[in-house]
Image: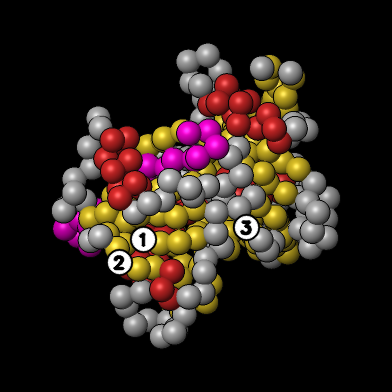
Amino acid sequence: MKLEFSKVSPSGNMTILVWSKVERSNHAKIANILMDCTYHLGAEQVGYVEVSQNPKAIAHLQMMGGEFCGNATRSLAFMLVSRNFPNITIKNNLAKFYLTVSGVQEPLEVEVECDDNKNPISAKVEMPIYNDINSVCKKDQVNLVSLEGISHIIVENSETPFDKENYKNDFIKFRDKLELQDEEAVGVMWKNTEADGSISMEPVVWVKETDSYYYETSCGSGTIALALSIAKENNSNYQEFKIYQPSGKYITAIVEKNDAQFIKAYIKGAVDIIAEGYCFT
């Protein structure tokens, strides 16, 4: 099968976007082939670009396992501007539009920052959070954050150190203890707070459909989950965090809330195009 693709790096989280039409029944199988770094393109995740069924959105992103991915959504927004996709207007160096994404019910607003020549620089996406403040809760000594399409477990690295050699076994213990085996996707985020107050994390994500475990170089939904867990404990109605990823780059997370609920949340950051063209499976 000949496939048109783009390989992009949103803050280091290597992502393949497939522009060719592929039957959803083949998504997981083809994604596993494409993600293989020895025999194929190599990546941490694959998303398929489709026509959106919602008139408000200009395109749809279907992730390899039907999950939601914030970084992949940012990647698609960035690439649509890069490709001069129809119905995108750039005003004051910003392009704003909507996308639909697997794992999420409603269209998500995206914003792409451009230079004076209308070339995209970075992308921002509204994250599909639950407004209920209790979507972040303490359970078995860890924070559990529920998002549309994925749940994240926040672990303090100082209490349970991240083991890069055995993260899969540790991940399974956390996931199974919280009985999350039936979720579409689950992440475990090991949170580090440095001496200077900066925050970093070690993200591992499992997707049920592909049964894949990845220590990700960057994780958008994990970043917002971590930000929500911090924001819940603070009184400020607007909170912004720079959360450093294993790639060495950071994702900016923005949380708007009041005493009773989360209102909106966003992630934003750089996106780099690595390769484009055709591949074969």
Residue 126 in sight in this render: yes
Give the residue type that dot 1 points to.
Answer: Leu
Vertical relation: 280 (above or below) 16? above
Q: Quadrant of residue 134?
A: bottom left
Which residue does the numbered mark 1 point to in the structure image?
144
Which residue does the numbered mark 3 point to in the structure image?
104
Front residue of this view, candidates 275 and 32: 32
Describe residue 8's horizontal placement relative to residue 188 as left or right: right
Residue 136 percent coordinates (x, y)? 39, 68
Give the residue type that dot 3 points to.
Answer: Val
Give the residue type that dot 2 points to.
Answer: Lys
Vertical relation: 91 (above or below) 17? below
Front residue of this view, candidates 158 and 25: 25
Describe residue 264's horizontal placement relative to residue 236 as left or right: right
Which residue does the numbered mark 2 point to in the structure image?
138
Residue at 68 percent of width and 29 percent of height: 26
Provide the residue span drawn in magenta.
191-211
Nearer the N terminus, badge 2 or badge 3? 3
Quarter of the image with the N terminus in it: top right
Describe residue 95's horizontal placement relative to residue 176 as left or right: right
